Amino acid sequence: MSAATMNVNIVASDHPVWSGEAKSVTIPAYSGGMGILPGHEPVLTVIREGDLVVVDPEGTKHSFEVTDGFISFDSNKLTVVIESARSISNQTVEETGL
Amino acid sequence: MGSQLALKSRIASTGSLEKIFNAQEMIAASHIAQAREVAMNAKPYTDAIFDAVQTLVAHSHIKHPIAQSNEDNPHVAVLSLTADRGMAGAYTSSILRETEDLLNRLEAKGKKPQLYVYGRRGVTYYKYRNRDLAQTWEGDTEKPGVEVADAISRALLNAYMKPEEEGGVSELYIVYTEFINMVVQKVRVLRMLPVQIVEAEHGEAGPTTTEQMETALPLYAFEPSLEEVLDVVLPKYVRSRIHECLLEAAASEVACRQNAMHTATDNARSLIEDLTRKLNASRQASITQELTEIIGSADALSNKEE
């Protein structure tokens, strides 16, 4: 499962934000942070304002500040639907010591 | 035959009009590219919401006020999408005609329609006729952003969710212009609320429906609960549908304007040609007359000398 990736698609109401493969995604779910790894069970969750972090296969972290919305995960495809998003930073995980 | 001066000034003014029409046509053409871009940017969001609603429908029989009709309340809302500016041929007038038709039909059925208008032309039309408007929006009809769609859908959903005594409505109709292609645009009436999700599934998804059902089969987990997910997703769905209508209306408006301006440019050109012909004929006539006069008087003089 270590090399597994999932397809991530982040869309805001007026433009697509980010899409591609990812190793893991952390979302600001309704009841607190929620991590999603490839092969997660199908889920449809309301999310709140907060930070969304995507780790792509190269280990680069993409962080976004997102507003409310929802995510749906099905057949290894994660769709994040939000009102608007702002990219905060891209940093490599290795550099931050992880 | 008109005087040459009058003809000249008419040619000049028609010429400058032609320039204006031509410029308007070019502007409309460039706006089409913009409208297309806005629509392309909104498409992934609309698709994602549509998929989510499909999933919800596949998993539960939706019991939510947005999807259920309340037949007892005779109040209904009608949203009419018109243009901000004129010079778009029959765009706004066909919308207004269809709106009037719809209002009459609804009244005949014993409903009490409330009118919501988007677009300055429509608003001034109704204000001039002292009609009661529930709410109006103006600006950006050529490239409606998310903000406008948000304002409109919020107001309409508010009206829809309110109980009858407080002025709530039981249905929402949208009159807008469907963009078929650059040459053909058609006025359509769409019943937006209550949402008919099941019908939309059969109508719009078409042959892919069974496929979607199969892919949606794994049991979903809804967090925090199905009801709360519905509360979040359905208003967003309505808003994105309204935004879709706005975008389509905007594309139609721009296409209408481009067509109208193209025809106007052509007309101005043929008018200039006609006038130039008249001017030439009148100049020729005056030259002929002068010549006749000179020859006539020369003849008279030479006759005298003899």
Image (spheres, helix red, strand yellow):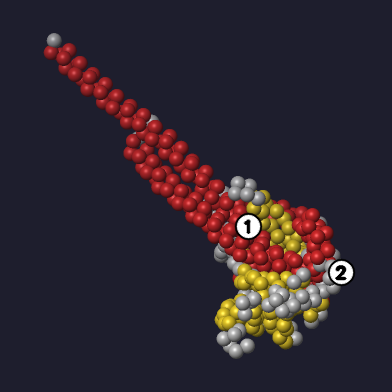
Residue at 69%, 57% in the rendered image: B175
Which residue was labeled with disc 1? B249
In which chain is the residue bearing label 2?
A: B
Q: Looking at the rendering, which quadrant does residue B158 occupy?
A: bottom right
Q: For mark 1, give the secondary structure.
A: helix
Type of the residue with mark 1? Ala
Residue A54 visible at all:
yes
Percent across and percent down for residue B134 are 67, 67
Residue at 86%, 69% in the rendered image: B61
Percent across and percent down for residue B126 are 62, 59
Type of the residue with mark 2? His
Q: How many marks?
A: 2
Q: Is residue B16 above or below residue A58?
A: above
Which residue was labeled with disc 2? B61
Q: A98 or B117: which is nearer to us?
A: A98
Residue B156 visible at all:
no
Q: For mark 2, give the secondary structure.
A: loop
Check if mark 1's residue and mark 2's residue have beta carbons within 8 Å: no
- Position of the C terminus of chain A, as image quadrant, is bottom right
